[in-house]
Image (spheres, coloured by chain):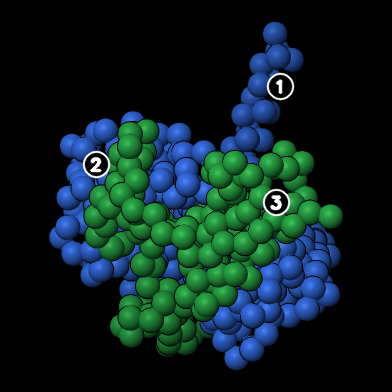
Amino acid sequence: MRTGPALTRRTRLVVTSAIVAALIAPVAFDRDSFPLSTYPMYSRARSGESTLITARGITNDGEPRELTPTLIGDSDDPLVVVGRLRAALSAGRGDVRCAEIATRVSGRDALADVASIEIVAERHDTVARTLDEGSLIEREVRATCEVERP
Amino acid sequence: MNRVLDAEAPATRLAAFRIVVGVFVVVYLIGRSPVFLALADRPAADFEGVGILAPLSSPPSSGILTALIVVALATGVATTLGWRYRPSVIVFALTMLVLTTLRGSWGQLLHFENLMVIQLLVLAGSPAADAWSIDARRSNGDQRGNGDEKSIRYGWPLAVAGLVTVVTYVITGIAKLRYGGLDWLSGDTLQNHIAYSAARLDLLGGNKPVLAEIAVRQEWVLGACAVGAVAIELGAPVVFLGRRFRNVWVAAAWLMHVGIFLTMAVGFPSPLFGAAFVPFFALERIPPWVTNRLGRKRTVSVAS
């Protein structure tokens, strides 16, 4: 089976050039998008201290309880979870996101002792954290909400 | 440029590319379908369309989303088999473009699926079902041997797909020097990125990447890895210099992705599973080689 003649060299040159131009356009304009991208992930210099956004449960006794990425962001991808938390906070929708997490937590029997949810911004020495050493520098609660159960 | 424009290949090589990319994307879509389906549950207020979805002010309904996934799967299988190839591959590429764009349209641009989708779009513009396909069997009948003839028709699309891989890597290398500067080449930045990924996962209640702790302790190794990563990315064009250069670069790039996955739990599926590198290899030689090996074994066992 043959499906039509080969393109002329000139046409191949134009098409190839157009594809390369499309690929490098985001770099030229410094504008990230999808699927054409500047691929900025992990490209910036990063210090050893970082502020990380997360959410945690607080029990009736005031003790913190670790949640999972799925409970926090309805995804197993940490990039997505953190991205959605950041987007909600910067849009002033932290309370809404907090309520969504509380709803997911309320359905988990294993977390029956969790009375409230906090969305927090924590500043850590990330190298120390990775090595299981003391790392917390600062914690700021950005949103809080109750876990309501029927 | 001439190596791309005048590249020749048999129809079977482009067909092998179609089959590998088709299988990879279909399996990827099946595996990630819960993630794609879950997009329907996200609050419409968080939607921020990017790319081709930028004109949309709200996300598509769950019905449309489900239909897109079903259509992508059906046309993906048809593309892989080479059945009604032309309309199938175009619809497959476009639905995958919409689905993956949608995934990045919630305030967080993701960069895992770019290369996969762009190569799929290149495939959509190529005559990749002229061999090893249902379409070819139907129309060829007794002329199946034609797939071995080399032609620019089959070599050029493959070379363009390879060029897409090369340019993508060069851009990632440029990004590190542009946004991170020479600081990126010190082991500190890489150490901090690995530590940041591990701490982020840890704080979200996930497991730290397998080799994160070990890697963070090896500062001197990370310095070499940082320079190596940028060298691999900027050096991607060497794949066009010949077989040895190609083999060394592909092995280095693949190992880099394995390292990224083990230390940062960040997986770029297309290069990690090899699909991004397929255009560089003569995969059509594998089936005859396997057949020969099996034939030899049978001959030996019959003789003995």
- Tell me which amino acid carries mark 2: Leu
SS category of the residue bearing label 2? helix
Q: Are marks 2 and 3 in contact (CB under 8 Å)?
A: no
Chain at numbered mark 1: B
Q: Check disc 3: other Cα within 10 Å, few if <14, some if 14-19, many if 20+.
A: many
Tint applied to chain A in the drawing: green
SS category of the residue bearing label 3? helix
Query: Which mark is nearer the camera, 2 or 3?
Result: 3
Asked which quadrant contains residue B181, the reply is bottom left
Q: Are marks 1 and 3 in contact (CB under 8 Å)?
A: no
Q: Tell me the distance, in whole angstroms, between the alpha carbons under discs 1 and 3.
A: 61 Å
SS category of the residue bearing label 1? helix
Judged from this view, the residue extending furthest toward the top is: B304
Mark 3 lies on residue: A105
Q: Tell me the distance, in whole angstroms, between the alpha carbons under discs 2 and 3.
A: 39 Å
- Tell me which amino acid carries mark 1: Arg
Q: Check disc 2: other Cα within 10 Å, few if <14, some if 14-19, many if 20+.
A: many
Chain at numbered mark 2: B
Judged from this view, the residue extending furthest toward the front is: A61
